[in-house]
Amino acid sequence: MDRPGTGLPPVRAEMRVGLLGGSFDPPHAGHLHISKEALKRFGLDRVWWLVSPGNPLKPHGPAPLSERIAAARALVDHPAIAVTDFEARVGTRYTAETLRELRRACPGVRFTWLMGADNLVQFHRWENWRSIMRAVPVGVLARPGLRLAAQTSVAARAFAHARLPAPQSRRLGGAVPPAWCFVNVPMVDLSSSAIRARGEWRGRKPG
Ligand SMILES: Nc1ncnc2c1ncn2[C@@H]1O[C@H](COP(=O)(O)OP(=O)(O)OP(=O)(O)O)[C@@H](O)[C@H]1O
Ligand SMILES: O=C(O)c1ccc[n+]([C@@H]2O[C@H](COP(=O)([O-])O)[C@@H](O)[C@H]2O)c1
């Protein structure tokens, strides 16, 4: 599929592509771990990291996009995981808009939105979050301390009828939305904010 100017990796129609949106400020082994788990658990062919120009809900801007993209590309060590600056190229920050643009750019590709449990807890604050649920399957991966909060969140309760039981998680990538699944993967206790606080990321000072 030829999509000049989108910066997207090669893909074929009918492929199942998981999308891990994030600030990646900085990227870390937790991102890589959940991406590999998502490939296996949700029956995906690819995972794309959508490195965000900036989370609309976060008050402080992240490090420059070029630094976060470079760090992400240096970290990724799996042939099915790719890093993209698609949102900056098409000028979207809200996930609902990004998904519209991706589906326009890649007709026939089956996208699944991926997130850690912390994001499901506040998912109901995202712009048009219900439309996201109705547009693509959503795969949620456990994160330390947030498993229960995620599964009792506003979004989890509102879409309880669309929850795919974990033993059937491999069906998620091909499921008709709304469909979401929470998987209890082994957890990696890493976060970008902790890395910034330790001063181990040159992209931006802690704070
Ligand atoms: N250790 C982890 N376990 C599970 N999910 C994670 C982990 N780290 C990041 N994620 C998920 O990856 C996505 C992108 O995360 P993000 O780039 O914001 O990193 P972060 O470590 O959560 O950053 P911050 O600490 O600044 O909030 C989110 O859906 C987040 O929930
Ligand atoms: O669309 C929204 O309203 C929205 C609100 C908060 C976060 N997001 C997206 O969620 C992803 C995770 O963001 P972050 O900053 O927690 O890594 C990233 O792709 C953001 O663009 C999207």
Image: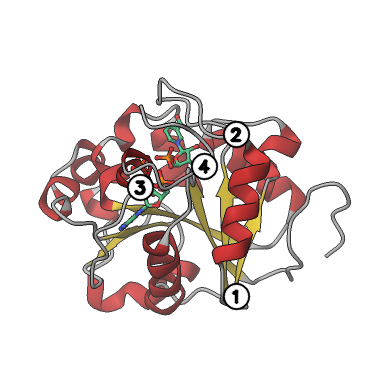
> Above or below — where is 156 with respect to 13?
above
Q: CA distance from mark 4 to mark 3?
A: 10 Å
Residue contact between numbered discs 4 and 3, judged by CB atoms under 8 Å? no
| Disc with the residue nearer the chain's start (4 vs 3) | 3
Q: Earlier in the sequence, mark 4 or mark 1?
A: 1
The residue where tag 4 is placed is 202
Quick one: label 4 or label 2, which is nearer the N terminus? Answer: 2
* Mark 2 within 8 Å of ligand 2, using the beta carbon: no
| Label 3 neighbour load within 10 Å: few <14, some 14-19, many 20+ | some
Q: Indicate the secondary structure of the residue bearing disc 3.
A: helix
Residue located beneath label 3 in the image: 195
Q: Secondary structure at mark 2?
A: loop
User: Mark 3 to mark 2: distance in Å?
Assistant: 19 Å
Say whether mark 3 is within 8 Å of ligand 1: yes
**In the rendered structure, which amino acid carries the disc numbered 3?**
Ile
Q: Which residue is mark 2?
A: 53
Q: Nearer the viewer, mark 3 or mark 1?
A: 3
Residue position for label 1: 80
Q: How far apart in space, not on screen, are marks 4 and 2 (Cα)?
A: 18 Å
